Image (cartoon, rainbow, N blue to C red):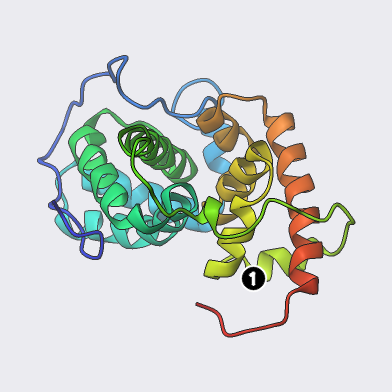
Amino acid sequence: MTSASAPPAAPAPAPVPPAADPGTAPVPDGCGDGGNGGAAQARARPHDRLLGHAVTRARAGDEAAFGDVYRAVQPMLLRYVRGLVGDDADDVASEAWHDIVRDLGTFRGDGDAFRGWAATIARHRALDHLRRAVKRPRTTAFDAVPAEPAPAPDSAGVALENLSTADALAMVAALPPDQAGAVLLRVVVGLSGPAAAAVLGKRPGAVRTAAHRGLRRLAEQLAETPAGPAR
């Protein structure tokens, strides 16, 4: 199995990639080349444009560009997977990258769409992992903190500033499932509302609402937690 700390081998050049088959993770609606994709790309954040350019070069077999893609996406992807499967995140992330390399020729879209596509693949691999592990004890971020979030609102900025720490990921995992999933995708992965909604199979408005409520709960919890060194 490929280590999650080093990029896997770049895929072979794919000058004319085939259309994605039904088993391939979908590109979020509105984030690809079709429909309003051009307008979406015009409004894309700078780092999304850079990632999109790197993905295009990687699809053509540029190994250096694929390394850029891996370094840009792996940290957030690993944090997302750790929020789903805990201590087994490295193995699951490696499985996800195997699938990403295999199917990269089928991908169409910009940087935001690629992060959503990669998160969808990682989520599928995480769910497969949890199904395999259902009959044996496992340690996940969901076990780390009792699910007793405080409902009182506070500054969501507190949550944003602390979300990269292991303790904050455990707190996210203790949120109600819909809020935890939305916060992980919107804040940890950094997806847009439509891209996060496509990963979760929900409406963008529902995902934004769940993320907002989750951040309000996190802000209260983190405000009451003594500050410590980031991990």
- Which residue is depicted at the point 15% across and 49% down? 10
Q: Residue furthest left?
A: 12
Of residues 167 and 45, the one nearer the viewer is: 167
Q: Is residue 159 above or below residue 191?
A: below
Q: Is residue 217 visible?
A: yes
Q: Is residue 44 visible?
A: no
Q: Residue furthest right?
A: 152
From the image, tell me which residue sits under label 1: 162
| Residue 67 picture location, percent across and down | 23, 60
- Which residue is depicted at the point 68% across and 30% down? 204
On the image, which quarter does residue 73 sit in? bottom left
| Residue 156 picture location, percent across and down | 78, 61
On the image, which quarter does residue 130 sit in? top left
| Residue 164 picture location, percent across and down | 55, 67
Of residues 201 and 168, the one nearer the viewer is: 168
Would you say 182 lies left or right of 7 here?
right
- Which residue is depicted at the point 33% across and 37% down? 125
- Which residue is depicted at the point 26% across and 40% down? 100
**Amino acid on which disc 1 is placed:** Asn
Element under disc 1: helix
Would you say 79 lies left or right of 100 here?
right
Label 1 packing within 10 angstroms: few (<14), some (14-19), many (20+): some
Would you say 208 lies left or right of 153 here?
left
Of residues 52 and 184, the one nearer the viewer is: 184
Q: Is residue 132 above or below residue 188?
A: above
| Residue 175 picture location, percent across and down | 68, 48
Label total for image: 1
Q: Residue furthest front?
A: 136
